[in-house]
Structure formats: structure tokens, C-alpha cells
Amino acid sequence: MEQRKTVFDEIMLEKKQAWDKEQKDRAQQWKEEDADRKKSVLREEEEYKYNKSLTRKKEEDEYQAKKAAQEKELAERKQSVEKELEEREKAVAAENRNCRV
């Protein structure tokens, strides 16, 4: 009877140790999966921020290029209008001189 109890206790001890090991392994696996999920989320956030920053930079560059082109066009128009106005003023002044004579 004593021997049966000892065998039973040994079997129970082995099963408990196996169960404890399984619990530790499962806890470790959950911990690793949680860490992997956190890394994945962090990576996705960083990628989103990088792409957002890249898109904004591209849009800003396009805006600045468009603005510079419009400012150049405006300056050229202004110069053209001023030149035309100067020529008209000269023509009017010349006509006034011809009329006085």
C-alpha cells in the first residue's frame, strides 16, 4: 500500500511539474506574442508618421514650386505692363508735343 502511495505521489508530482512547466511556457509565449504585437504596432505607427511626413514634405515642395512660378509670372506681367505703360506715356507725350507745334 505504501509503495502504491509513493508511486501515486511520484506520478502526481510529475504531472504537477509538467503542468507548471506548461503554464510557464504558455505565459512566456503570451509575453513574447504581446511584445511582438507592441513592436508591430509601434512599427506601423512609425511607418504612418514617416509616410505622413513624406507626403506633407512633397505637398509643401509642390506648393512652394507653384508659388515661385506664380510670383515669377506676376513679376514678368508687372514688368510688361510697366513697359507698355511707359511706351504709352512716351507716345502721348510725343503726340502732345506734335499738337503744340
Image (spheres, rainbow, N blue to C red):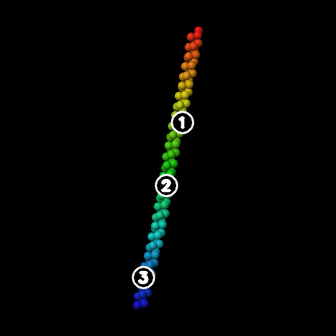
Where does the image place residue 22, in percent across and percent down from the top left? Answer: 44, 73
- The secondary structure type at the circle numbered 3 is helix
| Cα–Cα gap, marks 3 and 2 | 50 Å
- The secondary structure type at the circle numbered 2 is helix
Name the quarter where the C terminus is drawn.
top right
- The secondary structure type at the circle numbered 1 is helix
Q: Give the class, few, some or many, for how many residues have Cα within 10 Å of label 3's Cα (few <14, many ≥20).
A: few
> Is 99 located above or below residue 11 in the figure?
above
**At 55% across and 22% down in the image, what residue appears?**
85
Left or right: residue 82 versus residue 10 is right
| Tally of marks | 3
The residue wearing badge 3 is 11
> Is 69 located above or below residue 2 in the figure?
above
Q: Give the class, few, some or many, for how many residues have Cα within 10 Å of label 1's Cα (few <14, many ≥20).
A: few
Q: Earlier in the sequence, mark 1 or mark 3?
A: 3
**At 56% across and 25% down in the image, what residue appears?**
82
Where does the image place residue 66, in percent across and percent down from the top left? Answer: 51, 37
**At 49% across and 49% down in the image, what residue appears?**
52
Q: Amino acid at mark 1?
A: Ala
The residue wearing badge 2 is 45
Q: Earlier in the sequence, mark 1 or mark 2?
A: 2
The residue wearing badge 1 is 68
> Is 71 located above or below residue 59 in the figure?
above
Q: Amino acid at mark 3?
A: Ile
Location of residue 94 by image quarter: top right
Q: 85 and 51: which one is in front?
A: 85
Q: Earlier in the sequence, mark 3 or mark 2?
A: 3
Where does the image place residue 68, in percent across and percent down from the top left? Answer: 54, 36
**At 50% across and 40% down in the image, what residue appears?**
62
